[in-house]
Image (cartoon, rainbow, N blue to C red):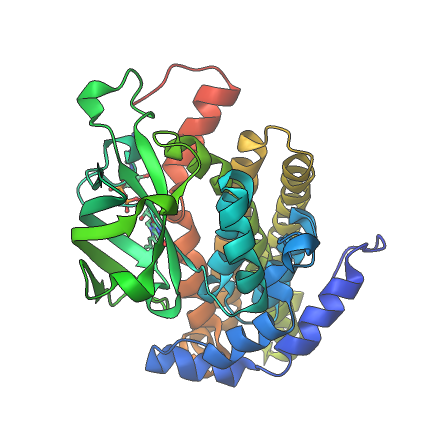
Amino acid sequence: MTSAAPDPHQAIRDGVRSLCAQFPDEYFRRLDSERAYPEAFVDALTKAGWLAALIPQEYGGAGLGLAEASVIMEEINRCGGNAGACHGQMYNMGTLLRHGSEAQKRDYLPRIASGELRLQSMAVTEPTTGTDTTKLKTTAVRRGDRYVVNGQKVWISRVQHSDLMILLARTTPLAEVKRRSEGLSLFLVDLRDAIGHGLTVRPIENMVNHETNELFFDDLEVPADSLIGAEGKGFRYVLDGLNAERTLIAAECIGDGYWFVDRAVRYAKERVVFDRPIGQNQGIAFPLAECYMAVEAASLMRFRACTLFDAHEPCGAEANMAKHLAAKASWDAANACLQTYGGFGFAHEYDIERKFRETRLYQVAPISTNLVLAYIAEHVLGLPRSY
Ligand SMILES: Cc1cc2nc3c(=O)[nH]c(=O)nc-3n(C[C@H](O)[C@H](O)[C@H](O)COP(=O)(O)OP(=O)(O)OC[C@H]3O[C@@H](n4cnc5c(N)ncnc54)[C@H](O)[C@@H]3O)c2cc1C
């Protein structure tokens, strides 16, 4: 089900859909029950070049914009998969691209584009400070030609399926900076060297099939040239990257939203109770119509955020609004779909309950709903800061 207007991204949609067709519902359902990583799926996406969409051609990527990248993510979820297993590879490199040195870009980006190196992980969140990022406690202290890292992170995804990880750590104590957003720095950590040599990874069992971990840094040494950009400016670089992340995750929610509406509509036409298809009841049909409109509207905001991002214009408000509207639309669609399926929605074999759990995450991560509302209230409406 799509809108009637011609779609400028149809070729991308067709390409991703034909790849996804090789990985049907049963594939993701089995991995979900085994809590296993979709290795074959991510390999296929990488080999086909889809995860290098945003890497410029001079570094071996496709040189596409955020709009095209968002359509790739949308289609993965719309086909029943979960781009959360690999979306880091799509956007984490943006930090390196926009703020890394030419030497770092030449060294890493072609190998990330080819799939030789995976940059799936970014470590920001900490257990004791949560959303209050500038108070994070992990430190990186310069000693000669190295930084020594100590601290802890939580909910850091895909570390076991990545070679590299972007790390946000404090390089100047909070008490010594004028603004709390200063004194934080970004590092490109080579996980192959780090794990077992100062970095311990402890997996977190969780509600969805999502590989995520606690990280413990105990005198981890990283080379000084793994610093990305200028020391102390890391928080600003992270914010830049988060706009791309939020927009791409909005696209995943849009894909989920369409998937739920499509499945529910199909079932509502087929399922006959009281001698008529359940979709003939307005109590079933109207929520689905409402959900479809919300997904379409979120999709428009997603494209607005993409246009601004690709033009290097400020897009914090649009990226946050796209993420919020899309996450809300997909969650409402998930509920409407489950309700349409009745008891069968709870059976694993229909995949509704799996996608229901998966799309719920996006009310919380990568930024929770309240924090988006606080952002819009403060930065768009000019209301006083609430925290
Ligand atoms: C499966 C999963 C994968 C993740 N992957 C990553 C990753 O790869 N890298 C990474 O760095 N992080 C990751 N995260 C962390 C995620 O970004 C955080 O969970 C999220 O930002 C919320 O932070 P928190 O859990 O610490 O919640 P808290 O900050 O403890 O907040 C708890 C609740 O209180 C609310 N709240 C807090 N302060 C306010 C306020 N001032 N006003 C109103 N409400 C408030 C929040 O909205 C939230 O609902 C992941 C999380 C999950 C669950």
- Residue 329 seen by the camera: no
Q: What quarter of the picture does the C terminus occupy?
A: top left
Is the residue 252 above or below the residue 301 in the image? Answer: below
Residue 303 screen position, x and y as percent: 68, 43
Residue at coordinates 37% horizontally, 45% vertically from top-left? 225
Q: Which residue appears farthest toward the right when viewing the image?
A: 6
Left or right of 311 in this view: 98: left
The quarter of the picture where residue 305 lies is top right
Q: Is residue 241 above or below residue 357?
A: above
Image quadrant in which you'd find residue 18? bottom right
Residue 194 is at least partly visible in this image: yes
Residue 159 in the image: x percent, y percent? 34, 63
- Quadrant of the snapshot with the N terminus: bottom right
Q: Residue at x 84, y 52 (%)?
A: 5
Q: Quadrant of ligand 1?
A: top left
Considering only vertical position in the picture, is 371 above or below 303?
above
Nearest the eye: 35 or 65: 65
Which residue is drawn at the image coordinates 46% and 62% (left, top)?
A: 84
Percent position (x, y) of residue 228? Answer: 42, 41
Q: Residue at x 61, y 60 (%)?
A: 52
Question: Is residue 289 toward the left or the right of residue 228 in the image?
Answer: right
- Which residue is farthest left? 218
* Horizontal side, residue 208 vs residue 300: left or right: left
Q: Nearer the viewer, residue 20 or 192?
A: 192
